[in-house]
Image: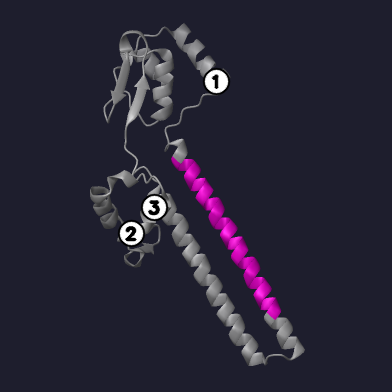
Amino acid sequence: MIKELLKKLGYADEDITKIEKGLSDEKIFLTKEENIEERYSKLKTQKEELEGQVKTLTETNTNIQTEYDNYKKGSITQEEYETKVKEIQEEADSKVKQNNFDSKLAVRLMSKEINAKDVVDIKANLDMSKISLDGENFIGLDEQINSLKEKKDYLFNKEETIITGSGESGRQKVDGNEPDFSKMSYEDLCEYLEKNPDVKIN
């Protein structure tokens, strides 16, 4: 990707090789996938979900063991023990389900499509009773998000890229449009590509 762009801008093969080596030496990596912030948010949320599941499992095992000890001591009957175990397992299943819902909702709200500034603030403005999860898809979410963006757009990040140029390029402000690559310095070009990994080169 970077090689194609540099060729398009008229860089010689020798210079391109030096630039690519420089990127590698400075550990600057470009990706065509989703932006780093979104990927980090997903990994962080998945980690929290797993931690929640482990915590729920530990609590469930502890509670069942406690009721079993009570049964062995004769404090409760076998029927009471079985009833309590069933209640404990149902509560655990409910917690895992809710944790899964919350985790996937957080990832969705932080995605580029919604671009929420803060998940907690967004959720506080949503009617959660009207939102459900069907596999990987949320039902009743998009409608509320679209309405919220119209009423309280300050809750969402703006899609805007600022590039500081040098020389004649000056300061360029890009809002949804590609900048003039021919007027950008090498540093500006690297910064732009790092912040916009999905940019297409015609």
Residue 192 image offset from top left, x and y in percent: 39, 24
The residue lying toward the viewer, choosing from 116 and 133, is 116
Residue hosting label 3 = 121
Which part of the image, by quadrant, shows the N terminus?
top left
| Disc with the residue nearer the chain's start (3 vs 2) | 3
| Disc with the residue nearer the chain's start (1 vs 2) | 1
Kind of residue indicated by mark 2: Leu
The residue lying toward the viewer, choosing from 77 and 16, is 77
Secondary structure under the numbered disc 1 in the rendered image: helix
The single residue placed furthest to the right in the displayed view is: 73
Indicate which label's residue lies in the foreground, 3 or 2: 3
Q: CA distance from mark 3 to mark 2?
A: 9 Å
Q: Which residues are magenta?
A: 38-66
Q: Residue at x 52, y 52 (%)?
A: 46
Disc 3 residue crowd, few under 14, some 14–19, many 20+, Cα 10 Å: few
Disc 2 residue crowd, few under 14, some 14–19, many 20+, Cα 10 Å: some
Picture disc at residue 184:
none
Residue 138 lies in the magenta stretch = no
Q: Is residue 149 left or right of residue 60?
A: left
Q: Is residue 94 left or right of residue 153?
A: right
Secondary structure under the numbered disc 3 in the rendered image: helix
Q: CA distance from mark 1 to mark 3?
A: 40 Å
Instruction: Work out whether 85 lies above or below 57.
Output: below
Residue hosting label 2 = 126
Residue hosting label 1 = 24
Res. 202 in view? no
Residue 53 lies in the magenta stretch = yes
Residue 118 image offset from top left, x and y in percent: 41, 48
